[in-house]
Image (cartoon, helix red, strand yellow):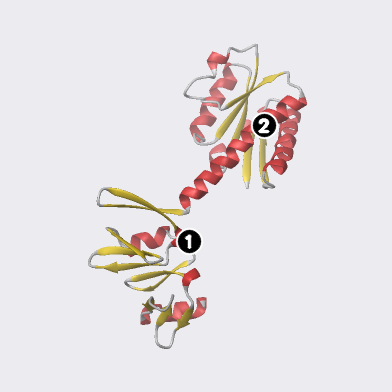
Amino acid sequence: MLSVMIFCHDKREGDLIGKICNQCVALIDKEFLCNFIISDEEYHQVNIEGIQPPDLLVVEITGIEDLCRAKRIRGIFPRGRLLVVSTNQISAESYLIPEVSPDMLLLKPYVYAKACRIIYRSLTWCCKDKCRKKKQEDILKIRTGGEIYYFHYEEIQYLEARDKKIILHVNQYEISFHSSLQKLEKSLPDYFIRCHRSYIVNFMFIQKADLINGEFYLNKKAVIPISQKYKAKLAKML
């Protein structure tokens, strides 16, 4: 889901920009959109810090007071994309500064088609940012022996603690690195399950679960022990 926060003097204009955002998102990736439209009257009544950081900020800047507001908003949400709505009556040098750091500019008065193009481009960037972030979250980064390795979580069969190191098993490939299962367990996706003090297994690779004898069979060679401590919990899961 994408989220947009719109700060406009006129709520009707904010509603129009929100409508364009909805139309653009439908064209981009069938994403759901959550709009927060904040007019001048609502600005001092809303707890902005309590709102979840948006993917796109749309901020109207037509005067010095707006510039101060934009700096504050940018300080609260430094990572979101920023689209500035402004006019030729205020110099672009006033908001093209690090404290504001806009990504796009929409000058008033604008025609509907131009607004659509600029908002569409801004939201496209937001979608790419989210995809890039998701890809980074789906990868385990390992540093060992002065080298860095990247593994997709889906490829990892299981993780084993052995000789004060972690052994990562990917197909028939093994790589060891310094860490702990306790630390890794917090960052792994939900489909990884702890079954032993020395093992965490990718549920997707389990071919057979033998809870009576306490073993997971991943293939003919890989048999992972299940300790008594985790049997009851795993029995409910499976």
Query: Which residue is found at the position 26% from the left and 63% from the top?
Result: 165
| Label total for image | 2
* Residue that numbered label 2 is attached to: 119
Q: Position of residue 145 (x, y in %)?
A: 25, 52
Q: Position of residue 14 (x, y in %)?
A: 71, 31
Q: Is residue 186 left or right of residue 90?
A: left
- Please say whether residue 42 is visible from this viewpoint: no
Marked residue nearer the N-terminal end (1 or 2): 2
Q: Mark 1 packing: few (<14 Cα in 10 Å), some, or many (20+)?
A: some
Q: Compare residues 135 and 19 and report the one nearer the observer.
A: 135
In-front residue for pair 116/96:
116
At which x and y percent is residue 185?
39, 63
- Quadrant hosting residue 231: bottom left
Amino acid type assigned to the residue bearing label 2 in the image: Ile
Q: Residue furthest left?
A: 163
Disc 2 crowd, CA 10 A, few/some/many (<14, 14-19, 20+): many
Quick one: SS at disc 2? helix
* Residue at the spot 60% in from the left edge and 33% down from the top edge: 57
Eyeballing the image, is 101 above or below 89?
below
Measured in 3D between alpha carbons, the distance from the residue under mark 1 to the one under mark 2, in whole angstroms, is 35 Å
Residue 61 found in image quarter: top right
Labels 1, 2: front one: 1
Q: Which mark is residue 154?
A: 1
Say if 232 sits above or below 149 in the image. below
Indicate whether 141 appears above or below 43: below
Residue type for callout 1: Glu
Q: Which mark is residue 85?
A: none
